[in-house]
């Protein structure tokens, strides 16, 4: 039938490999990790009737409900999980992160309220403060007696924290700091817990001592008294209705010469003596700033974790529905389940694989974060930034797809997916705008490249990379299209690594060329889209290595499934960037076609066990809540033949 | 610095071409088209204070506000625009579509309410009914005296209309039809105007006469009396809170043996005599069904038009903000406008180009629709389906990007973008699920291919396509990377056409091979992802030809700008599918790199005039409404150096 291409080129597709079994318990153990007991406690609490899902509340009522939920969680001790034992806490930051992640199966406003109080406000006291602050405040914050917030962003400066305009000027005579909002765009904006419930804020401000600006530091500033009235000099506004997260009371704050005692400076990285002498353990102001900001990396990790929980809920609902909802088919035959359509599989099943790959990647990130020492933070921070951006963009798309796969049912609030989509939108721009975070990761990689270059020397670096390049360009490898090769993790990793290395190389060269005729900012702007690809390649290669490590550790009941999930993820990544791989010569046409075909093969192999895999997310039925995921679907009548 | 790639490969980038001037008036004339006067009337009405934007209304109140808005529009005669003059209308379907499109600058719930009443309910009477119906109902529907809806979808069958379960059984003794909802999933679902305001519905049901099922037909069925009480045998439910469009009162309807006079059958394509004899001008039942459904193509066109209006609002807001909001920069220098970042340009400016290309494509579609004759509808229907899907998916992504480009400000309801994003989500699945529509287009192309094959004969078709293929594979063309070649519309079109032809060819071959061992449905499922690419390629090639036609017609003040927009659109399409172009041999590495570079070049050339271009959308300031688009931004203080 084809006039241009001979029929013999139409290869008989290779048969599907057998679908691996799903050991749900083992997969859940892997995903739950060491903090499984904490997760189970949260699951039990969320399953109680008082946490029941409510599709439609006024903003005011929603804020109250979320506050009550928060109080319930603090009463159960979850607020104290990450606090050291000497201050009455659980000394279990890993448990805290696991609790946060599990909460996000339920309500994202509660998740963020919990995060503002414990992940931001309390953590800032713990990580930026010293013993004086810990002894005075941590018990009250962890019990929820003292609710607070994290007043960093200003209207004029969100991403660019270093140029915040709020000032904290030391008054040596009174041994106090004076917190002040200059006119214009300097007021604090988007501050969670500010509009109604918070009584104290960690305020970020330019620290001015004796006329010298020492850069951004954090101070504890009361904003409301015990009766909930704003403190003198503090003006508070309500952010108003948002397109999501309306259970969180975001607000704006203006300070008019507000005074706090000298001790309220969170002084771990910069202190002012009673006499007004500034001192810091870190001499370089830029390094000091980044060290301070670096302590906040935990916040970004929680954002990634919670986005992934939202994806898991949406996929579970959509996959269950797709398994039962039928539409179209041959006359006289039963209609076909949506999940048996290739287009439906293409939308849901690679996302299912990616969600498990990213779960493992984020767990590794948590391990590194827990073990992180001050000073040795660049790599952890960069990857945390990249994973936050990658995961939240993935979540946005995956939840959009899940909604569409449920049609009009997916648009109903009662079925939750559209609500998750709406809430999750802001995940891509808060706790660091995704684009800014990807650039941060890429810049970190460039710095590392420069250092490697300086340390190893040109000759050895050349030799090392040339070998890698040679391997990648080996004409046998670039053309191999047999399935054993495509599913060989060493070959898979080599391709991802080749992309990352080449992008890094080229970015460094382009930057160097540009820097000869432009300032560093504009040189960087000129390669920004390149840096986005570099950061993405880094996150994907790291994530791939994570899942491969788990495969090597896994028992026989889990290993084949993890391999299939890895193959699905890998083939999807390479398929998306096929243009680049071919331009760079690392993949030639036969291999490219085989990889494209592998994507379709993997999702067909996954399809029979998709719903079983979602069972391993361990989302309690009461929390899942969506009727289309659980209630029997009304049966359609017989079809005319 | 690079160890693996010699520096000489790093080409000096070619200089930017001069940014073309923007003749805002001429561009607006092009976009407004022949119905400009109607558009201006709608703009004036929408700018009046009573249409002012309200960010936060209860669902109940919102429905009332939208009804009042609708009444205002009918009072101004907009409901009668598409009705023939002999029934008191304006006889101006083009004006009706333009009004619909312009309304979508304002509030999408109003747009849909307007569409339900006039685009669906009233149009079904006009297009599926005959003189009896026209004389009796069109005056009342167009004045808004008779509000109604379009009861097609059922819970069990949304996309698959042919298998609806509602029955309309003819009772010859009483000369009435009996409308009935069988148990299970057969009730009408998601019906606009049903929950509160509608009094009559166009109900789609299996028409059963003398025990024979003649397939789906439409009948007019009153559901509420003049007091708003449900008619006997009619049960109505409220769809409840949705994640968007809450100004539309969607509902569910159950019919329990509801009787309507025989004349209520909309009998243009199928009639039943008083004695119970069925007759139809179209003998083949499948052809009859598709002809009936085909008349509804106008609905899909309005969905695309309105999605594009929402994109234009979102882009206008985001581009204005990006031009004024500054963040980061060199120490001591003013911060840099967001729109000067390459990443920001990459997100907003290709979308700006695409929105104008699609505007032109949809205008061409409107022309074809207005001139369409019954019978000659396959091509128009297929392209309308594909354009609806392509435009709404584009809208979803473009508005998401616009929201992110405005950061937290974009998430505030008052700034509208997030509200648009939320409302538009369902555009991708209503009036035909996008995936189903893309398959519909692809199947139409396959049918055409088969016919061409049969008519032209193997030899001539072979010769024709072989020539095209040869041209595409000419090693000079596949490698040419000079800008004159890349910006040559003939070369651009050849590449898009090559992709479409090849995909069509290959799909036909794959289907034929599969059909030997599987039923048609499962054979089709196996090539579904291929068909999605084919449909996309067709829409893009058609859209490209549309803009090129306008370029050839355009005066000198407009032409260079349109060329730049065309280049931006083209380069983006090809860049996205670069893997395929390289696999197929149509593009080799030097050309691939040059095309990637062309995307960045085009957006830099567009950047200085981006805001001017949005002025040509003609969105009134009062309708744009978002403070971040208009109010002065508070100035940031001086930056520390």
Image (cartoon, coloured by chain):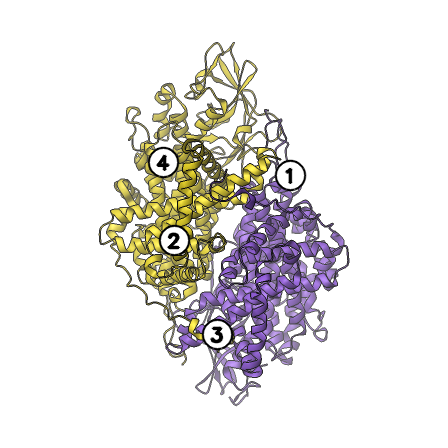
Chain colours: A purple, B yellow
Q: Looking at the image, which is closer to me, B356 or B154?
A: B356
Q: Residue at x 34, y 57 (%)?
A: B485
Q: Residues within 10 Å of mark 2 (few under 14, many from 20)?
A: many
Q: Quadrant of residue A522?
A: bottom left
Q: Which residue is mark 3?
A: A508
Chain of the residue on which disc 3 is drawn: A
Spatial separation of the CA atoms under disc 3 and disc 1:
52 Å
User: Would residue A144 be seen by someone viewing this image from the given angle?
Assistant: yes
Q: Which residue is mark 1?
A: A324
Spatial separation of the CA atoms under disc 1 and disc 4:
42 Å
Q: Looking at the image, which is closer to me, B83 or A235?
A: B83
Q: Position of residue A254 (x, y in %)?
A: 45, 69
Looking at the rendered structure, whether the residues under marks 4 and 3 are on a common chain is answered as: no
Q: Position of residue B438 (x, y in %)?
A: 48, 41
Q: Earlier in the sequence, mark 3 or mark 1?
A: 1
Q: Looking at the image, which is closer to me, A613 or A540?
A: A540
Task: Please identify the quadrant where the C terminus of chain A is shown.
Answer: top right
Q: Which residue is mark 2?
A: B570
């Amino acid at each position: 039938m084809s006039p241009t291409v001979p029929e013999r080129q139409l290869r008989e597709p290779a048969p599907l490999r057998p679908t691996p079994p799903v050991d749900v318990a083992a997969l859940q153990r892997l995903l739950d990790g060491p903090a499984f007991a904490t997760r189970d406690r949260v699951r039990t609490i969320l399953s109680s009737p008082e946490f029941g899902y409510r599709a439609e509340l006024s903003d005011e009522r929603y804020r109250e409900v979320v506050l009550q939920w928060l109080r319930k969680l603090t009463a159960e001790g979850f607020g104290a999980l990450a606090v050291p034992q000497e201050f009455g806490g659980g000394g279990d930051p890993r448990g805290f992160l696991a609790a946060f992640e599990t909460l996000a199966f339920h309500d994202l406003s509660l998740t963020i309220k919990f995060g503002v109080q414990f992940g931001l406000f309390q953590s800032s006291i713990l990580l930026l403060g010293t013993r004086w602050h810990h002894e005075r405040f941590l018990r009250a914050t962890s019990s929820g007696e003292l609710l607070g917030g994290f007043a960093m962003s200003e209207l004029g400066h969100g991403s660019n924290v270093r140029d915040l305009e709020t000032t904290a000027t030391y008054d040596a005579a009174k041994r106090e700091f004076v917190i002040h909002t200059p006119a214009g765009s300097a007021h604090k904006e988007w501050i969670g817990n500010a509009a109604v419930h918070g009584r104290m804020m960690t305020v970020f401000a330019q620290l001015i001592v004796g006329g010298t600006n020492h850069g951004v530091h954090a101070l504890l500033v009361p904003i409301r008294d015990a009766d909930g009235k704003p403190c003198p000099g503090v003006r508070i506004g309500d952010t108003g209705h948002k397109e999501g997260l309306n259970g969180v009371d975001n607000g704006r704050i203006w300070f008019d010469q507000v005074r706090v005692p000298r001790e309220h400076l969170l002084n771990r990285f910069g202190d002012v003596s009673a006499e007004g002498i500034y001192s810091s353990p870190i001499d370089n102001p830029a390094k000091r700033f980044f060290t301070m900001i670096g302590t906040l990396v935990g916040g970004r990790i929680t954002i990634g974790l919670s986005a992934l929980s939202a994806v898991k809920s949406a996929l579970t609902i959509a996959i269950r529905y797709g398994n039962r909802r039928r539409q179209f088919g041959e006359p006289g035959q039963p209609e076909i389940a949506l999940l048996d359509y290739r287009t439906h599989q293409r939308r849901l099943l690679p996302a299912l694989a990616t969600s498990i790959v990213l779960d493992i990647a984020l767990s590794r990130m948590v391990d590194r974060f827990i073990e992180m020492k001050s000073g040795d933070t660049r790599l952890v921070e960069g990857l945390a930034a990249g994973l936050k951006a990658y995961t939240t963009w993935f979540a946005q798309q995956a939840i959009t797809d899940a909604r569409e796969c449920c049609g009009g049912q997916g648009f109903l609030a009662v079925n939750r997916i559209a609500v998750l989509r709406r809430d999750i939108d802001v995940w891509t721009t808060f706790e660091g705008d995704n684009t800014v975070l990807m650039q941060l990761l890429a810049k970190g990689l460039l710095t590392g490249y420069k250092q490697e270059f300086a340390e190893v020397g040109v000759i050895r670096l050349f030799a090392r990379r040339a070998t890698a390049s040679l391997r990648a360009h080996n004409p046998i490898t670039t053309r191999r299209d047999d399935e054993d090769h495509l599913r060989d993790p060493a070959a898979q990793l080599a391709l991802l690594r080749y992309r990352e290395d080449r992008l890094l190389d080229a970015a460094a060269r382009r930057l160097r060329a540009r820097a000869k005729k432009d300032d560093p900012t504009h040189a960087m702007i000129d390669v920004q889209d390149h840096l986005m690809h570099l950061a993405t390649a880094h996150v994907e290669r790291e994530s791939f290595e994570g899942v491969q490590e788990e495969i090597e550790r896994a028992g026989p009941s889990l290993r084949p499934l993890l391999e299939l999930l890895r193959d699905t993820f890998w083939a999807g990544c390479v398929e998306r960037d096929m243009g680049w791989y071919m331009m760079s010569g690392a993949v030639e046409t036969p291999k490219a076609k085989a990889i494209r075909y592998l994507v379709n093969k993997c999702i067909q192999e996954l399809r029979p066990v998709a719903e079983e895999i979602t069972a391993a997310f361990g989302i309690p039925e009461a929390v899942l809540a969506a009727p289309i995921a659980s209630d029997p679907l009304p049966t359609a009548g017989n079809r005319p033949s």
